[in-house]
Amino acid sequence: MTTAERVDAVTGGTGLRLDRLVVKFGGLTAVNGLSLDAPLGRVTALLGPNGAGKTTAFNVCSGLQRPTDGSVELDGRDITALSPQTRARRGLGRTFQKMELFDHATVRDNVSMGREAAMAGSLPWRQIFSTRREREELVEVTARALELCGIVGLADRRPVELSTGQRRLVELARVVAGGFSMLLLDEPSSGLDKAETQAFGEVLRKLVATTGCGILIVEHDMSLVMDLSDYIYVMEFGTPIFEGTPDEVRRSPEVRAAYLGTEGDE
Ligand SMILES: Nc1ncnc2c1ncn2[C@@H]1O[C@H](COP(=O)(O)OP(=O)(O)OP(=O)(O)O)[C@@H](O)[C@H]1O
């Protein structure tokens, strides 16, 4: 595999699957029987109003939250009991709702850190004793991630100088540089205006088409999810209420009643 192909990290796996997930916090059931398939090469969305249980389900996927019941599989292997670090080594990358970029470093360095973190996670000493080949690879992978996310022109800028939309793309490039086959995106549209949301969606589509990675996006923003997703799961008060294509979701009376109505959409 060439270095650039490492960013195009298709493993031939089946992606992420949740099976009858239940998460309880004391007497509160935050997620009640959620099953979901997020295959590689597709954008899958988990949608729902505030408090629906999306973040809780997301945290179960990334390994920050243990489910009360049910399981998580990545490429056909049960990862329910694995740490976030081990999941990352298996190809599962994530972004955070609150962006954590290093404002003092350049965009290029921020993106490189995604690759370095992924390497350090697997073999800590290699970051200290990296070979020339690895340093070259880091440069190449970083350049590829910047290109895939359409931010080559921002490489020498610092995040503090950028708009929220541009910062989101830097954050995305950083996780892309990690070479993950499956990406979990937590409310990536938060803080973006309509044009920025649309531009971000276009980058995600291109990313999936170019690399074959899978994306699971957890969102409450209807427009991004409708434009971008191949398949959508909708939750309300912890319970899955509908699944289907964007058109099916748009036409669903249950979804309209539970969610679209509250957004004043259509
Ligand atoms: N650690 C926790 N302890 C107790 N209750 C929690 C915890 N985390 C979430 N909850 C509750 O679980 C329910 C689902 O919350 P969650 O954050 O998963 O929803 P969400 O769909 O992500 O909402 P939002 O869009 O506002 O982020 C809410 O009632 C919330 O108060």
Image (cartoon, rainbow, N blue to C red):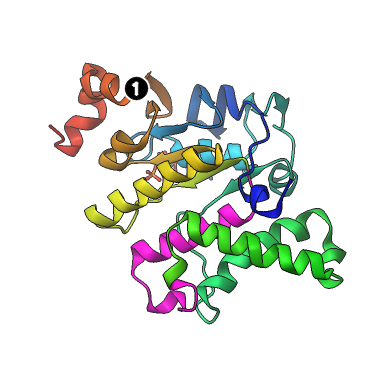
Secondary-structure class at tag 1 = loop
**Figure quadrant of residue 65:** top right
Q: Residue 76, position in %: x, y?
A: 69, 23
The quadrant of the picture showing ligand 1 is top left
In the visual, does 264 lie left or right of 204? Answer: left
Residue to which mark 1 is pinned: 245
Q: Residue 221, position in %: x, y?
A: 30, 43
Q: Amino acid at mark 1?
A: Thr
Name the residue: 35% across, 37% down.
228
Against 13, is 121 above or below?
Answer: below
**Figure quadrant of residue 12:** top right
Q: Which residues are magenta?
A: 154-180
Question: Dividing the image into 4 quarters, which one contains the N terminus?
Answer: top right
Against 108, is 179 above or below?
Answer: above
Q: Please say whether residue 29 is visible from this viewpoint.
A: no
Q: Residue 218, position in %: x, y?
A: 43, 40
Name the residue: 62% across, 26% down.
14
In the visual, does 127 lie left or right of 141? Answer: right
* Structural crowding at the residue carrying mark 1, measured as other residues with C-alpha within 10 Å and reported as few (<14), some (14–19) or many (≥20): some
Question: Dividing the image into 4 quarters, which one contains the C terminus?
Answer: top left
Magenta span: chief secondary structure: helix
**Figure quadrant of residue 108:** bottom right
Name the residue: 51% across, 62% down.
146
Q: Residue 249, position in %: x, y?
A: 28, 23
Against 252, is 101 above or below?
Answer: below
In the visual, does 31 lie left or right of 181? Answer: left
